Amino acid sequence: TLIHTLQRITIMNAENYVKAFQGIMGVYGLQFLLVPKKIHEDHFDSPATPMIKFWARGSSCAWLGLAYAVGEMPTAAAAKLCAIVSAGCALLYPFNAKFNLTGDTGNTVKYPMHYVPEVLMSVLTISGIVVNMN
């Protein structure tokens, strides 16, 4: 099957997957903390209001804390958590913004920049599924 072929040819193992997750979510956390206006306005056709910047900065604590915490966990448990969080993040952030899944986003995403989180979260999610099948 495709999944088994990917498992054989990939250099992605659970340890590398967790490190990739840490790096990606760590960068997101830093962006939310340091440049919330930029991250919002790069991806949406609306200005970053003071309240958007407030929420983005506050959420940076969770992303940065999670990026740190998964590195302190046993690898197998961390890989499972990273896969679950990646799937949830993919649904609630880029795909919710694109398809208005929760009915409150207004579908105002900016392309081509918004392809970045769509692809990134898809790859993280699929990679997480693959490494957790071992």
Image (cartoon, rainbow, N blue to C red):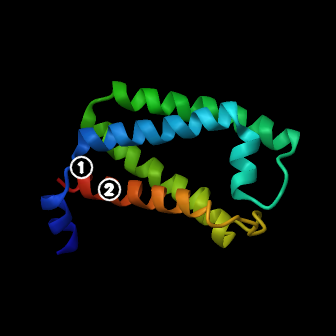
Asked whether, in this view, residue 36 is left or right of residue 115, the answer is: right
Q: Which residue is mark 1?
A: 12
Task: Please report contact status of discs 2 and 1: CB closer than 8 Å, yes or no.
Answer: yes
Seen in the picture, residue 80 relative to 29 is either above or below; the reply is below
- In screen coordinates, is 16 left or right of 101? left
Crowdedness of circle 2 by 10 Å Cα count: few (<14), some, many (20+)? many
Disc 1 element: loop
Hey, which residue is sitting farthest left in the picture?
8
- The percent position of residue 9, horizontal first and vertical second, equals 15, 60
**With respect to residue 22, does 132 lie above or below?**
below
Location of residue 96 by image quarter: bottom right
Looking at the rendering, which quadrant does residue 44 occupy?
bottom right
Q: Residue at x 69, y 69 (%)?
A: 100
Give the quadrant of residue 22: top left
- In the picture, the quarter occupied by the N terminus is bottom left
Q: Residue at x 79, y 61 (%)?
A: 45
- Disc 2/disc 1 C-alpha distance (Å): 7 Å
Q: Position of residue 87 (x, y in %)?
A: 46, 56
In the image, what residue occupies the spot 71% across and 65% down? 109
Q: Residue at x 62, y 66 (%)?
A: 112
Q: Earlier in the sequence, mark 2 or mark 1?
A: 1
Task: Specify whether 27 is left or right of 20.
Answer: right
Front one among 36 and 125? 36
**Amino acid type, residue under disc 2 in the picture:** Ser
Disc 2, SS = helix
The residue singled out by tag 2 in the image is 127
